[in-house]
Every structure is written in structure tokens, then in C-alpha cells.
Image (tube, grey):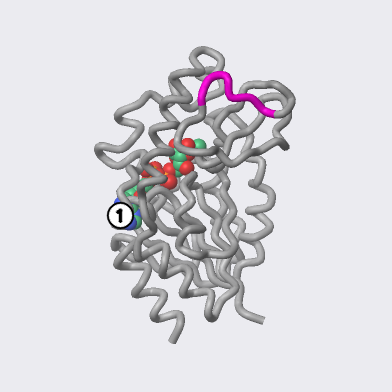
């Protein structure tokens, strides 16, 4: 059996594909107010504005391509049982070819019913519009976890983190919970790596190797090492 390698990714891994991060200078949350576009209250108040915000995000994602960091994780599958847990709503891990990807915060290319969360659809084209309805007749919303909502796949992610034999963190500021707490569920004795060009605060984590590089540089180098 291949060793279980779990990778926790954030916006930084897609930055070099041209998708903006949230909290870097010039990031998305400088341009937009979270409370106006990414909460259930925002949706109740102004559905058009919320749809427009995510339509823009979707258009960018559809135009973007996976980068060297996404591809490096696919290479790892030669020797490891790789499970990616991503906070990203883009599909660049899948398009690069990674087989196991869990999206903690939803997926921009999908929509969801507002009366039955089990009804999830692939969006055709870039836009989800007011008046687009599920089979039960309710308005469709973006398949995204908004601030103030539960993270439905968090328990699955904890179980995966507990089973990790190697754990990697790539391109996340580690400030959004519960996702950021995932690393606390990994076994203390396993090797962990963190790749990010900026300083990221993680306290009390043993066996952590911090690599201060961009994902497209740090990850292919580390993957080469691990495949030796
Ligand atoms: P952030 O924008 O908070 O953090 C991005 C991280 O990527 C920072 O630590 C940067 O230093 C790093 N970074 C920037 N360029 C990089 C590069 N080329 N290579 C590697 N790292 C790089 O994004 P997240 O941590 O992903 O949630 O944000 C977490 C959640 O907050 C998102 O999933 C989203 C957001 O609000 C929802 O929308 C629910």
C-alpha cells in the first residue's frame, strides 16, 4: 500500500494561475466587503449582487489553467496515496489530474438548490442567473460555503487528516476556521511541510518543515525529493 499523503491547499496554490488570493495586498477581500457578497444575509438582501460576484469568479476560473504546483501534486500519486483537501473553489487540482480532491468551501462550477442541499448541478457556461431554478422550483445559489455557514465536509476532512502519514500545507494564511484547525488533527509524529512565501502562524505543531517559497517553486522541488 502506498503511504497516505494529505495536502491542505489554499488560494496561494492557484495564485500563479492568475486567480487572486483573498488576504494578500490587492486581494479579493480588499476589493469586496465579505458581508455584501459572501454571507447568507447578503444573499437574502441582494441576490443579483452575490450572483454577479461569483459569476466573475467563475469566469476567471474557467479562463485559468493549472500551474506547476498543481501538476507536481499529480506526480506525487506515483508513490503516494495523495488526498487533497482544498479550501479553493476552483477546479484546477482536478484539471491537473489529481484523483482525490475534497472541496471544503464548495465549488464555483456548481450550483445548489435553496430548498434541498442534496440537489447540486454543474453550471453550464459562466453565469448563474436570477430565475435559474432547481428541479423543485427554487432559485439556485452558488455551491459555496459562505461565512456564517457550517462546513459540511469538515468531519470527513478531520478523518482524513487523522490518517495522514505525511501532511503538507500549501498557500493558505491559516486564519479561516474551522478549516485552519485541520492540522491539529494530524498525528504529532508525522512529517509536515508548509509552503508559503509569507510567514504563516501555526503554533505548537511538531515536525514542521517550513519552506518559504512560492508554490510553483517550492512544491516541485519538494515533490522531487519525496519521489527519490
Ligand atoms: P488567503 O488569501 O487568506 O491566503 C493566501 C495565502 O497564499 C497567503 O498565506 C499567501 O502568502 C499565500 N501565497 C500567495 N501567493 C502564493 C504563491 N505563489 N504560492 C504559495 N502561496 C502563496 O487565502 P486562503 O488561506 O485560501 O473562503 O483563504 C481561506 C478562505 O478564506 C478561502 O477558502 C475563502 C476565503 O474567504 C471562503 O470563501 C469561504
The residue tagged 1 is 16
Vertical position of residue 169 compared to residue 207: above or below: above
- Secondary structure of residue under mark 1: loop
Q: Is residue 202 left or right of residue 178?
A: left
Q: Between 126 and 84, which is closer to the camera in this rendering?
A: 126
The spot of residue 119 in percent (x, y) is 70, 35
Q: Quadrant of residue 214?
A: bottom left
The reply to whether residue 163 is in sight is: yes
Q: Quadrant of residue 66?
A: bottom left
Vertical position of residue 19 compared to residue 81: above or below: above
Who's the residue at 43% across and 31% down the image? 55
- Quadrant of the drawing holding the C terminus: bottom left
> Alpha-carbon neighbours of circle 1 within 10 Å: few (<14), some, or many (≥20)?
some
Task: Note whether ligand 1 is within 8 Å of mark 1.
Answer: yes
Who's the residue at 57% across and 64% down the image? 99
In this view, the residue farthest toward the bottom is 228
Q: Between 70 and 156, which is closer to the camera in this rendering?
A: 70
Q: Is residue 217 left or right of residue 193?
A: left
Amino acid at each position: 500500500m502506498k503511504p497516505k499523503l494529505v495536502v491542505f491547499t489554499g488560494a496561494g496554490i492557484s495564485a500563479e494561475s492568475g486567480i487572486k488570493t483573498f488576504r494578500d495586498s490587492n486581494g479579493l477581500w480588499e476589493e469586496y466587503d465579505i458581508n455584501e457578497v459572501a454571507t447568507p444575509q447578503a444573499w437574502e438582501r441582494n441576490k443579483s449582487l452575490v450572483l454577479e460576484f461569483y459569476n466573475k469568479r467563475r469566469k476567471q476560473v474557467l479562463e485559468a489553467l493549472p500551474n506547476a504546483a498543481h501538476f507536481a501534486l499529480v506526480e506525487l500519486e506515483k508513490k503516494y496515496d495523495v488526498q487533497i483537501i482544498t479550501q479553493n473553489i476552483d477546479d484546477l487540482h482536478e484539471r491537473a489530474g489529481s484523483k482525490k480532491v475534497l472541496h471544503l468551501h464548495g465549488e464555483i462550477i456548481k450550483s445548489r438548490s435553496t430548498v434541498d442541499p442534496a440537489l447540486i448541478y454543474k453550471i453550464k457556461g459562466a453565469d448563474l442567473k436570477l430565475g435559474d431554478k432547481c428541479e423543485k422550483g427554487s432559485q439556485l445559489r452558488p455551491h459555496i460555503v459562505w461565512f456564517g455557514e457550517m462546513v459540511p465536509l469538515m468531519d470527513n476532512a478531520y478523518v482524513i487528516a487523522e490518517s495522514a502519514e505525511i501532511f503538507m500545507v500549501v498557500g493558505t494564511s491559516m486564519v479561516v476556521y474551522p478549516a485552519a484547525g485541520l492540522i491539529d488533527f494530524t498525528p504529532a509524529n508525522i512529517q509536515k511541510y508548509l509552503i508559503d512565501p509569507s510567514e504563516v502562524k501555526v503554533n505548537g505543531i511538531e515536525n514542521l518543515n517550513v519552506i518559504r517559497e512560492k508554490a510553483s517553486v517550492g512544491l516541485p522541488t519538494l515533490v522531487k525529493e519525496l519521489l527519490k
